[in-house]
Structures are given as C-alpha cells and as structure tokens.
Image: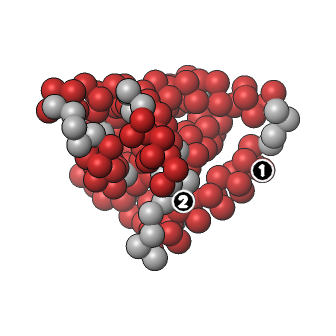
Amino acid sequence: KWFNSAIVRAIALFYGSQSMEHIQIFKIIIALMVLINPLSAAPIFLSLTPYNSARERRKIAQTASITVAITICIFALVGDLILRFLNISIGSFQVGGGILILLIAIAMMNAQPNPTKHNPEEAQEAGQRTSIAVVPLAIPMLIGPGSISTVIIYASTAKNWWGVAEIMLAGLVVSIVC
C-alpha cells in the first residue's frame, strides 16, 4: 500500500496541481502491468512458436494483445453484473482476489512460475493447436484470474462511467505494451 501511495505522490508532484482522481489511471496501469507481466510470457511465447515465421509470430502477438484489451474492456463493463448474477458480494470477491494475488506474489518471490497461468499440459496442448494467440497465450498466460479480478474490483469501485473508461483506457495502454 505504501508503494502505491509513493507512486501516486511522485506522479502528483510531476504533474503539478492535478487532482488525485486523475492519477487513478496510472495506478491501474501499474497494477495491470505487474499482474499481466508480458516479459514473463515472452519465453513461453517463443517456446510455443519455434516453427512460426517472424510474420506469423507478429500476427499471433497482435491477436493476443487485442484479446487482452477486449477481455479487460468486457470485464470492466460487465464484471459487476456477473458478480451480482452469481450473488457474490464485492467484499468477498476482494478477499478472494487478494488471496489469489498473494499466492502469485509468493510464487514470484520464490522464483517459481505463476501457478495460475501456465502448466506443462497446456504447453503440450498448445503445441498441437493451429492458433495459440487467444488460448493459452492471451488467456490465461497474459490476462489470468488475478488480472481479471483486479479489473472487476477496480470497475466495481468506480464512481461513474469515467472511472470505468479509465480502466478500459488503462487496459488499452497495457495491451499495446504487451
């Protein structure tokens, strides 16, 4: 928590007198970049596409990036409705999402691969697929359960449509970086 407030204060100093509400998009971008972590997906991407040409790899990467953006936008818009339909309170979802992110962080600290993203069975199945851009590359390797729960939590705490638009804009920025 102190790290997020330090980042927000640094950005506020850099941008001057802008209100803290406008800084929210930077927090969302940082959170999604940490959870999506496109650099960790690069070796797996290369191992799944050893026989593809550079043009095919570029196309697969673009499709995966577009899928990440679409997934973030969909869950930002309808994530809260899904939770209400399933009768899950946002508090319960925050606790579950927090535990999931804690497990991901512990795995990262122990230099272990993220348990929610990729396993050997998926790698073998992906090798047999003709297109790996959407599954398993975009979902769940890039945007997994931790990222989706973060998007839903941010969207549910948004005060208005501009807050949801900020989440979608942050998702577009992150997908471009991916």
The residue mark sitting in front, 1 or 2, is: 2
Q: Is residue 45 above or below residue 105?
A: above
Residue at image position (22%, 37%) is 51
Which quarter of the rendered picture does the C terminus lie within? top left
Q: Position of residue 110 (x, y in %)?
A: 46, 76
Q: Which residue is the site of mark 2?
A: 115
Residue 96 percent location from the top left of the image? 71, 54
**Furthest-right residue in this view:** 87
Give the secondary structure at mark 1: helix
Residue at the image point whose x is 50% and y is 46% from the top: 122
Counting residues from the N terminus, which is met first, the one under dot 1 or under dot 2?
A: 1
User: Is 88 on the left-hand or right-hand side of 161?
Assistant: right
Give the alpha-carbon distance from disc 1 to disc 2, as whole Å: 22 Å
Amino acid on which disc 2 is placed? Pro
Percent position of residue 151, x then y: 55, 39
Seen from the viewer's position, the closer of residues 65 and 88 is: 65
Identity of the residue drawn at 28% across and 53% down: 43
Q: Nearer the viewer, residue 5 or 107?
A: 107
Decide: few, some or many residues near mark 2? Use Cα within 10 Å; few <14, some 14-19, many ≥20.
few
Q: Which circle marks residue 92 in the picture?
A: 1
Which residue occupies the foreground of this view, 151 or 141? 141
Q: Secondary structure at mark 2?
A: loop
Q: Nearer the viewer, residue 115 or 164?
A: 115
Dividing the picture into quarters, in which one does residue 86 lie? top right
Q: Is residue 175 visible?
A: yes
Locate residue 150: give its quadrant.
Answer: top right
